[in-house]
């Protein structure tokens, strides 16, 4: 590999790569994102390689393994270029047909196409799929074009040109000003202005001149996987952003703190870093500019609290991930007490775009105080699950219905949970709310890192609040009393409520407790921990009251408050439930309606799943 | 309420004398409506105690690094018009801030913290005294019977003053505890007893007549000043 | 000894403790008492600190694990789609709680906060194989495959 020693070298390499890229050549793109992997894209890829080899098509057809395309619901996804054919839910068996039909005979395999659920028509091209149509894939769009193991793929799309521009045409202060003017806000949750953070980091005194840059990839929010998608699919964009950031604050040392649960992200990032070093885009004297910077990947140990900046830094320092008081900001006194610029993966990935296209261009996207786009992981009870990228200011309704395709099985929408365990649940009345840092905070939720979990009428809001509280209780570091003891007590109270032992004063006690936890906790985890409870009490108080007063769970979720029964009119006596029941609570003769013994029933719900006639009822 | 907030007791108020006279090194702030100039780098707790204002603490000790864990020392800090609760033991004094050490919000929070702590560690006299002093007569949570309040004084004492490191925190969240490695006697422990000396729970067990795992309140009618308020 | 090699490889790092422990665990499957004591000695970090770190992070096991590691995702998306019932089912047929190993040593059952494949929830992982869109009814047949090779 030839080292890139000047911006001209990079430009000529980019031109060369673009020229080499044969637009006529057939390229089959296989999504290897987390969603597709779970439904067997590895097998699809293997059989694709085998088939191509068997038919001796290696010269004609290129196979590309990419990161997540976003539409996980329909995985494994195959994209055939240059025609742009979009095949979904492909399994191993489909491969020979795809090769014969599409590659050799140039015909389309109809049954693998995406069917528009409303118009019932088949859609051939990816860009026409409604899921993609309403998105604005500024940061995430390149994922389907890039093999994360190949730096050339990224460079051929104009990668690292923003870095060249920053290093050779701008001063560090100009870079910082550009980010400041763009209005970019932290994508990790808090929404702090990135430019201002860099400024205070740059201006903070550091006697030996040491400053650090950190990429926070400890994506702990359950139900969110945007950072994973980005880091696995397009690691160079994050690296480029970090180098630019380091140049702006004059740092020579960077860390990428990646979650322990994402081994593939660690591997891809390490490969990407090695490739960037070989090209001279990282390390000493980057692109001949005289600027040195390198990045070390640090694997986390599996602790949600390490997403908090001071805890993350403690973890990098090899200590227990306990937050410390943040009266002095980490941008002034962070890692090893040096000024540190810590940003989230998505924030870093936005940086090269801003430098390349300019702050003015970027600030036209989004709302007045929230600029750019945001990637959300749209999951839960929704038709089109996956990663979506939308401009700020789009309404929640558009995300749920236009992109997400509404709620499955004709169920009713109940709530949308944003912001992970620190966020809140928003009811249907607030669906027209624009997605914006401040708007979401105003109604008691938050942008968070971008998890968006949709809930339907069968979701119990008290159960959801209990889920988050339990999660936070187990993930709290336990250093400060309000968080450790307060959350423990909140879980106890809410468990009582869901078990039918709720008492009239419980809601008030819960509310009083949330105040203390919110105000007196040491770090962000504790300060935001009551949000799921507060927001569910605020918007779904009647559900809490139904649990406490009537001892009923309206959504039929809380085990102690529901009963299973068999509808005699619907039961055909097929015996499926009887065979499945683990405690033999169901009895009855074949072809006669069965009966359920309430004494024995453990409410596991297997009979409900197994019954082909919907004869099992919950009340 | 057995004692009144200092906020109400002080009307007008005379300015406090400066601690040092090196102008560059001073920060002026307002604590409980009294203007004061103190040395940079001090914490609010140190400044307030120097002024004679009592702030209850559990995890703080002069000889050890501030930890900010018990949150009992919370005070209201008003900075640029925004009021926030902060732990005074770790918050450094800053120019122009206003501090309320005993406002209603502060008291409410402290009472809740004591209630939370006493419900899990009712045997500690320190906590029972605090509860009596604050007029807490009812615990609304399920009583437990733990001893350790996880203030971390022993851990810091062992490490910072005794230069040892025989004990440390293990686990996290609700399962957190102070222990020696593998729950076995530590090889580096010299048996100096400093950890026991500093523990606010071990040496001072509540001797009031009460059922085990109950709120004592035997001292509720003692003058509040006896509790250090 | 492997452990010494890992320690020597990482000694140059500013922050060797967590990477060293992670790598040792990768090879040995868990961190034994003697390993932790050894790491503490070699890196000259107080034992209480090493033990504190090893018990703080959920990635570290201090007990040996079974042949097959069953890992159930309990992320929000999976929870909404009913992972609790799957957990109860697994607890029932394996006879262990999350974090424990079956008596015969075939399975270790753990739960995870989020696997990052939320779109396909509920998700279960055995070894390196993923099972998306799980239901309690599917559990039996999947587990059976791992019991009889």
Image (cartoon, rainbow, N blue to C red):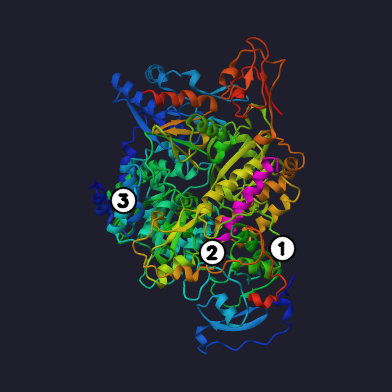
Per the image, the residue denoted by label 3 is: C34
Q: Is residue B38 magenta?
A: no
Is A173 on the left-hand or right-hand side of A374? left
Residue A499 lies in the magenta-colored region: yes
Residue A117 rendering spot, x and y as whole percentages? 60, 25
The residue depicted at 55 percent of the width and 71 percent of the height is: B91
Q: CA distance from mark 1 to mark 2?
A: 25 Å
Q: Chain of mark 3?
A: C
Q: Of the residues tagged 2 and 3, which is closer to the observer?
A: 3
Q: Is residue A63 visible?
A: yes
Q: Chain of mark 2?
A: B
Residue situated in front as seen by the camera: A437 or B153: B153
N-terminal label among 1 and 2: 2
Residue A601 against residue B102 in the figure, above or below: above
Region rendered in magenta: A480-501
Is A23 situated above or below B35?
Answer: above
**Mark 3, residues whose alpha carbon is within 10 Å: few (<14), some, or many (≥20)?**
few
Q: Nearer the viewer, residue A483 or A540?
A: A483
Residue behind mark 2: B69
Residue A337 x, y percent position in the rendering? 42, 67
Name the mark nearer the viewer: 1 or 2: 1
Tell if the residue under mark 1 belongs to the same chain as the one under mark 3.
no
- View extreme (front): residue: B209
Relative to A12, say whether C93 is above or below.
above
The circle on residue B137 is 1
Helix, strand or loop under label 2: loop
Q: Secondary structure at mark 3?
A: helix
Q: CA distance from mark 1 to mark 3?
A: 50 Å
């Amino acid at each position: 590999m030839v080292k890139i020693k000047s911006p001209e070298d990079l430009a000529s390499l980019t031109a060369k790569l673009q020229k080499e890229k044969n637009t006529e050549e057939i390229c089959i793109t296989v999504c290897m994102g987390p969603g597709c992997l779970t439904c067997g894209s590895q097998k699809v890829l293997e059989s694709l390689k085998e088939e191509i080899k068997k038919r001796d098509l290696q010269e004609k057809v290129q196979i590309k393994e990419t990161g997540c395309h976003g539409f996980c619901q329909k995985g494994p996804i195959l994209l055939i270029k240059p025609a742009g054919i979009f095949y979904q839910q492909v399994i191993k068996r489909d491969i020979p047909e795809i090769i014969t039909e599409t590659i050799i005979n140039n015909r389309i395999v109809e049954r693998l196409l995406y069917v528009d659920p409303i118009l019932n028509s088949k859609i051939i091209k990816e860009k026409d799929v409604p899921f993609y149509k309403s998105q604005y894939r500024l940061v995430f769009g390149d994922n389907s074009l890039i093999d994360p193991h190949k730096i050339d793929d990224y460079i051929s799309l104009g990668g690292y040109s923003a870095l060249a521009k920053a290093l050779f045409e701008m001063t560090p202060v100009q870079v910082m000003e550009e980010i400041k003017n763009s209005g970019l806000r932290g994508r990790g949750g808090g929404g702090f202005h990135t430019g201002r953070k860099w400024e205070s980091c740059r201006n903070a005194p550091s006697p030996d001149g040491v400053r650090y840059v950190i990429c926070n990839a400890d994506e702990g929010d359950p139900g969110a996987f945007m950072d994973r998608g980005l880091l696995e699919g397009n690691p160079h964009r994050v690296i480029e952003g970090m180098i630019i950031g380091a140049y702006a604050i004059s740092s020579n040392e960077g860390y990428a703190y990646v979650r322990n649960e994402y081994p593939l992200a660690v591997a891809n990032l390490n490969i990407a870093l090695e490739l960037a070093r070989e090209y001279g885009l990282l390390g000493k004297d980057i692109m001949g500019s005289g600027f040195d910077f390198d990045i070390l990947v640090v694997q986390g140990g599996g602790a949600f609290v390490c997403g908090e900046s001071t805890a993350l830094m403690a973890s990098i320092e090899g200590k227990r991930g306990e937050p410390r008081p943040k009266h002095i900001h980490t941008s002034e006194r962070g890692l090893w007490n040096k000024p540190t610029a810590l940003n989230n993966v998505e924030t870093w990935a936005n940086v090269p775009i801003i430098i390349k296209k300019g702050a003015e261009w970027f600030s036209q996207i989004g709302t007045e105080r929230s600029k750019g786009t945001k990637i959300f992981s749209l999951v839960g009870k929704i038709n089109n699950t996956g990663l979506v990228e939308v401009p700020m200011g789009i309404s929640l309704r558009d995300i749920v219905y236009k992109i997400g395709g509404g709620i499955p099985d004709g169920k009713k929408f109940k709530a949308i949970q944003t912001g992970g365990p620190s966020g809140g649940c928003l009811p249907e009345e607030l669906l027209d709310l624009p997605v914006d840092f401040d708007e979401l905070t105003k109604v008691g939720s938050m942008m968070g890192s971008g998890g968006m979990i949709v809930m339907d009428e069968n979701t119990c809001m008290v159960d959801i609040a209990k889920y988050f509280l339990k999660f936070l209780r187990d993930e709290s570091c336990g250093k400060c009393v309000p968080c450790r003891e307060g959350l423990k007590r909140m879980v106890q109270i809410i468990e009582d409520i869901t078990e039918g032992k709720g008492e009239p004063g419980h809601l008030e006690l819960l509310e009083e407790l949330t105040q203390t936890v919110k105000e007196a906790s040491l770090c962000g985890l504790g300060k935001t921990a009551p949000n799921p409870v507060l927001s569910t009490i605020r918007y779904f108080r009647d559900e809490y009251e139904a649990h406490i007063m009537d001892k009923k769970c309206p959504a039929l979720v809380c085990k102690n408050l529901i009963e299973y029964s068999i509808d005699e009119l619907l039961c055909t006596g097929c015996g499926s439930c009887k065979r499945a029941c683990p405690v033999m609570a169901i009895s009855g003769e074949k072809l006669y309606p069965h009966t359920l013994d309430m004494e024995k029933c453990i409410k596991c719900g297997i009979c409900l799943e197994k019954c082909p006639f919907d004869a099992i009822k919950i009340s | 309420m057995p004692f009144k907030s200092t906020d109400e007791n002080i009307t007008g108020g005379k300015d406090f004398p400066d601690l040092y006279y090196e102008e560059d090194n001073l920060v002026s702030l307002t604590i409980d409506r009294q203007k004061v100039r103190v040395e940079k780098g001090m914490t609010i707790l140190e400044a307030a105690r120097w002024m004679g204002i009592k702030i209850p603490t559990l995890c703080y000790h002069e000889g050890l690094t501030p930890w900010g864990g018990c949150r009992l020392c919370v005070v209201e800090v008003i900075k640029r018009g925004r009021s926030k609760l902060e732990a005074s033991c770790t918050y450094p004094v800053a120019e122009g801030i206003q501090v309320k050490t005993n406002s209603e919000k502060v008291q409410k929070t402290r009472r809740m913290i004591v209630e939370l702590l006493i419900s899990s560690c009712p045997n500690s006299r320190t906590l029972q005294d605090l509860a009596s002093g604050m007029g807490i007569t009812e615990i609304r949570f399920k009583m437990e019977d733990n001893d350790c309040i996880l203030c971390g004084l022993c851990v810091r004492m062992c490490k910072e003053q005794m230069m040892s490191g025989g004990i440390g925190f293990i686990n996290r969240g609700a399962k957190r505890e102070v222990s020696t490695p593998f729950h076995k006697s530590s090889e580096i422990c010299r048996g100096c007893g400093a950890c026991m000396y500093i523990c606010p729970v071990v040496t001072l067990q509540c001797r009031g007549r009460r059922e085990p795992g109950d709120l004592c309140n035997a001292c509720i009618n003692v003058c509040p000043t006896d509790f250090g308020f | 000894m492997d452990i010494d090699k890992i320690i020597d490889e990482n000694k140059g790092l500013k922050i060797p403790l967590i990477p060293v422990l992670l790598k040792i665990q990768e090879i040995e499957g868990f961190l034994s008492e003697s390993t932790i004591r050894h790491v503490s000695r070699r890196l000259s970090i107080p034992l209480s600190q090493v033990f504190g770190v090893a018990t703080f992070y959920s990635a570290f096991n201090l007990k040996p694990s079974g042949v097959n590691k069953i890992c159930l995702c309990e992320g929000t998306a999976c929870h909404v789609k009913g992972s609790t019932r799957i957990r109860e089912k697994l607890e029932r047929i394996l006879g262990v709680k999350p974090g424990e190993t079956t008596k015969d040593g075939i399975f270790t059952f753990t739960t995870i906060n989020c696997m990052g494949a939320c779109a396909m929830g509920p998700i279960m992982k055995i070894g390196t194989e993923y099972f998306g869109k799980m239901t309690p009814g599917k559990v039996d047949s999947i587990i059976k495959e791992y019991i009889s090779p």
